[in-house]
Image (cartoon, rainbow, N blue to C red):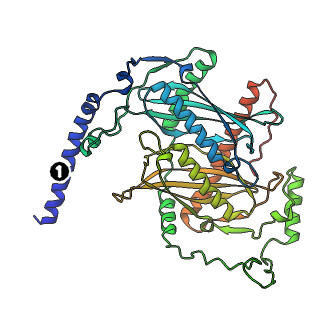
């Protein structure tokens, strides 16, 4: 037998033996470690009422958390949602809990600088080692005291063992993150009972939902990030600025763009359909279409201790905030306007990243409509010590282009250049219709709770 084959067989046998030993010893080793909760004189219970996990967070939106228009970034609100939900999960489980998934989130109203945001979270139902947490976000204007509904979503958390961190390398191997049983949730009020019953339906729907395979487009974006595109971006031109150039020569205007006749035709057709679009000349787009690869953007972040929980696992809300930054960058490459995140599709965290990892976020506009666009975002984490790179999660953001008065802006079309891009492009219509239906259900639900008669007009061709 050649030595290479012998070494390969030996490595395989050794790996199987190590995995077998780990499988047997890890649970035993975990139980030998002390439990901080019981060590403090407390007793773990098998059942808990739902109201014990309730959390109410209040945040004031600062300018650093807003875009150019003074509206809060969706990523900031998502990070608050994740923190509030995580606290509720930890209160119920009395152990560290990590985000497993986030259902679709639709934002019904933007939040401005100075607004007071209230985030309410509580556990809806618990299973063996996991929990569903419902979160409601409302905001209030400090000047008018007007309160308005912002968003609502459901997150799934998994409880991990609260045993202390091992001090040795062998101890860290044997005491890896292990799931732990959580108390059964006892609903008492009519609303808690309703949430409890609906949680199981949502859980089964998550299990049945088929996760589409976007590995090809992720691999293509990875190649783009490594400079392997056939048509890479050209160097940016030197823009003459009076502060740096003595010459008073002014740069010539961009010649390409939509003609005045074409612009008037588009706006007139929109008016006939009862729609209103921005007529601000500053919002006139320079081109009518862009290739899909032109919208590619990449964000690279180093996970620092402030980005992670007590187990040194990156906050799910922090990942979502980085995803929104990348999505906005891609959207801005297509549309030159003010951009607002309207919704985010459900996210499943396949694997986690930790302190010291390098998180790479890549995005591109998968399809554009009249004034909104769908942006596909993928995330991967790299352990710089081992060189291991793993896919963590992906998702779709819906970004809307508006002018300074919040009037929608007509944006260019995105054109797919590859077969993979065409597949992503064609699937956008079905995903969009699903979002519109979910938004309609949410609006009707909120109106019904306020005893209002909803008057809803959703245009699928927006």
Q: Residue at x 56, y 22 (%)?
A: 196
Closer to us: 358 or 184: 358
Q: Residues within 10 Å of mark 1 (few under 14, many from 20)?
A: few
Q: Is residue 126 visible?
A: no
Q: Compared with residue 308, is residue 374 higher up or lower down, i.e. above or below?
A: below
The image quadrant of residue 94 is top left
> Residue 123 at x, y = what percent?
54, 26
For this orientation, the residue located farthest to the left is 1
Q: Nearer the viewer, residue 315 or 136?
A: 315
Measured as percent of width and height from the top left, residue 371 is found at 76, 56
Identify which residue is drawn at 58% across, 55% down. Answer: 376
| Residue 329, image x, y percentages | 63, 60
What is the total number of numbered labels drawn onto the structure image?
1
* Relative side of 328 to 213, left or right: right
Q: Residue at x 69, y 64 (%)?
A: 334
Within the image, what quadrant is residue 57 found in?
top right
Q: Is residue 183 above or below residue 413?
A: above
Specify whether residue 429 is in view: yes
What is the secondary structure assignment of the residue under circle 1?
Answer: helix
Q: Is residue 86 left or right of residue 430?
A: left
Q: Quadrant of the N terminus?
A: bottom left
Q: Is residue 25 left or right of residue 398?
A: left
Point 21% across, 41% down: residue: 20
Q: Report which quarter residue 416 is drawn in.
A: bottom right
State the image coordinates of residue 44 (x, y, percent, origin top left).
Answer: 39, 19
Q: Is residue 226 above or below residue 349?
A: below
Q: Label 1: which residue?
A: 13
């Amino acid at each position: 037998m050649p030595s290479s084959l012998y070494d390969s067989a030996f490595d395989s046998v050794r790996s199987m033996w190590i995995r077998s030993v780990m499988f047997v010893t890890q649970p035993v080793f975990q139980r030998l470690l002390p439990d901080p909760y019981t060590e403090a004189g407390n007793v773990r219970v098998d059942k808990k009422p739902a109201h014990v996990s309730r959390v109410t967070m209040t945040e004031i939106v600062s300018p650093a958390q807003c875009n150019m228009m003074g509206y809060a970034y969706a990523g900031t609100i998502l990070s608050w949602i994740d923190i509030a939900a995580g606290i509720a999960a930890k209160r119920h489980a009395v152990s560290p809990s990590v985000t497993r998934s986030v259902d679709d989130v639709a934002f019904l109203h933007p939040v401005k600088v100075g607004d007071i945001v209230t985030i309410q979270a509580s556990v809806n139902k618990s299973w063996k080692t996991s929990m569903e947490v419902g979160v409601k976000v409302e905001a209030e204007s400090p000047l008018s005291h007007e309160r308005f509904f912002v968003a609502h979503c459901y997150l799934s958390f998994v409880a991990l063992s609260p045993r202390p961190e091992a001090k040795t390398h062998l101890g860290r191997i044997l005491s890896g993150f292990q799931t732990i049983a959580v108390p059964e949730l006892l609903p008492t009020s009519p609303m808690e009972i309703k949430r409890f019953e609906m949680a199981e339906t949502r859980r089964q729907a998550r299990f049945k939902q088929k996760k589409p395979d976007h590995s090809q487009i992720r691999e293509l974006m990875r190649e783009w990030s490594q400079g392997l595109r056939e048509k890479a971006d050209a160097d940016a031109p030197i823009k003459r600025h009076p502060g740096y150039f003595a010459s008073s020569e002014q740069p010539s205007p961009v010649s390409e763009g939509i003609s005045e006749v074409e612009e008037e035709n588009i706006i007139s057709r929109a008016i006939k359909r009862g729609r209103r679009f921005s007529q601000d000349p500053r919002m006139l787009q320079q081109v009518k279409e862009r290739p899909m690869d032109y919208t590619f953007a990449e964000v690279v972040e180093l996970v620092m201790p402030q980005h992670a929980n007590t187990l040194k696992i990156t906050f799910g809300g922090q990942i979502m905030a980085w995803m929104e930054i990348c999505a906005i960058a891609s959207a801005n490459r297509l549309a030159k306007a003010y951009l607002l995140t309207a919704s985010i599709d459900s996210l499943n965290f396949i694997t986690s990243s930790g302190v010291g990892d390098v998180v790479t976020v890549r995005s591109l506009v998968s399809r554009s409509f009249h004034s909104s666009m769908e942006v596909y975002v993928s995330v991967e984490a790299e352990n710089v010590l081992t060189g291991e790179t793993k896919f963590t999660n992906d998702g779709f953001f819906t970004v809307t282009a508006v002018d300074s008065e919040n009037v929608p802006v007509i944006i260019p079309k995105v054109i797919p250049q590859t077969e993979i891009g065409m597949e992503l492009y064609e699937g956008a219509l079905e995903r969009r219709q699903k979002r519109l239906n979910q938004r309609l259900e949410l609006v009707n639900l909120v109106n019904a709770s306020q005893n209002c008669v909803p008057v809803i007009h959703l245009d699928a061709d927006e």
